[in-house]
Amino acid sequence: MYNIFDKINQLQSELSGLKISDKDQRRLDEKFRLEFNYNSNHMEGNTLTYQDTKVLLLKDILPQGKLYEMRELDEMRAHDAAFEMIKEWAADKEREISETDIKNLHKIILVKNYWNDAKSLKAQKSRKEINVGNYKESPNHVELQNGEIFHYAEPIEVPAKMQELMEWYQDEKDSLHPITLAAVFHHKFVLIHPFDDGNGRISRLLMNYILIRQGYPPVVIKSANKDKYLNALRLADAGDMESFITYMAEQAEWSLETTIKAVNGVSIEEANDWEKEITLLSKNLKSISVIRNFENTNERIQDSVIPLFKEIRNMAFEKFLILFKDIDLSYVIDGCTFNIDFDSNSPNPNNLLNLIKPYDDQQLYCSASFYNFINENKKSFDIYRYINVRFDKKKYMVYMNDTEPQYSVNNLINKPLSNIEISEFVNEFCRRTVGEIKKNIEKL
């Protein structure tokens, strides 16, 4: 540990005697901006490639040739905004970070409330709403590689533990080595896990706030080294904080060496940057090459189309039946009606499988009919809504065509709809249905 800190102090001392040009500062800032945003998000499951991250953040151009979820693009932009925010905070020496700032960071990186998959201790799957900017209201935990469950702080403990963390930071910020301070703060924050989602990204942002404020360059945890990072965190959980601090010091060494290279006008592009892109391009090509067949078409109907139709059905009867005397939903493919057993835990269409023709441009739709609007004036109306599904050779699209612009979700055939995509689609369906109702009321 002491050897790595000797090296850190030597690099920091060397850097303090150097002056960087504006040109080299710009390329250094760009390097850290791309590395930090790409790796921190990629570690949490974002699929944007390094090159597409560069195009999105530096050129503000949507990546071409690969289907990304809009959520992935939004969260990359949002994380970039949060990174700029913590640098601004760190530069203001009169300003101290607060719990309110941390909640605002959470609002920035998660953008808006959404529904996410969850799993109970009994392995029961469920969904819970993620409320941005608010501390968690339900417990969270992680399953370790050995199968054991590691519990974070209980929701009722979070406000007090966050206050303790901020007080600890104020007490120790002038006595601990900056890397030790940042690493320990990171670990303490993760142990609390104050939010329902986004804790990893927030912890890395706050760690870099501390380092930048103390005159250090940002630390980048490479997603390729995720296992080493998580293992260091687990060792800290078990009381071995020294290993985690050492791991962070090693990452800080890379950042300092990269900074010194930039100051000296040397290239800061890593030899393996292009290798990362080849690996990711290879994965993308494998997914793009998947051709639709009976099996994967059936899988997408079972895990994507039917769950979407089920949510539409549930929302129609739960929210809109108070406005209409009757609601009916029917399901059609190539002009043939099929039935869905929504009460089954594993929905299985009664006669749909015989209708699948995977090499045709098949059209499938759900028709939602709202009959006899309840009105004291006796005048009434019906409205009809359609959710369309189109299967092509390698992909499928779920969309709505009506008086408003088309709303659609496009996926490769081997990629199911996520719970977020289903939830957002259902919300848009309901919003448009309410709009149609209001238009008809105005005509009465």
Image (spheres, rainbow, N blue to C red):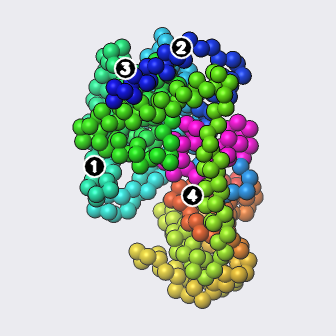
The residue most toward the left is 239
Q: Amino acid at mark 2?
A: Ser
Residues packed near mark 3 inside 10 Å, few (<14), some (14 to 19) or many (20 plus) = some
What are the residue bounds of the magenta stretch? 35-62
Q: Tell me if label 2 and label 4 are in contact, CB under 8 Å.
A: no
What numbered label is drawn on residue 16? 2
In the image, is residue 324 above or below residue 434? below
| Closer to viewer: mark 4 or mark 3 | 3
Determine which residue is flagged by label 4.
421
Name which residue lies at 51% across and 42% down.
Answer: 222
Helix, strand or loop at label 4? It is: helix
The alpha-carbon separation of the residues under discs 2 and 4 comes to 49 Å
Residues packed near mark 2 inside 10 Å, few (<14), some (14 to 19) or many (20 plus) = few
Q: Looking at this view, is 190 or 211 the one in front?
A: 211
Which numbered disc flags the more N-terminal residue, 2 or 4?
Answer: 2
Left or right position of 71 against 400: left
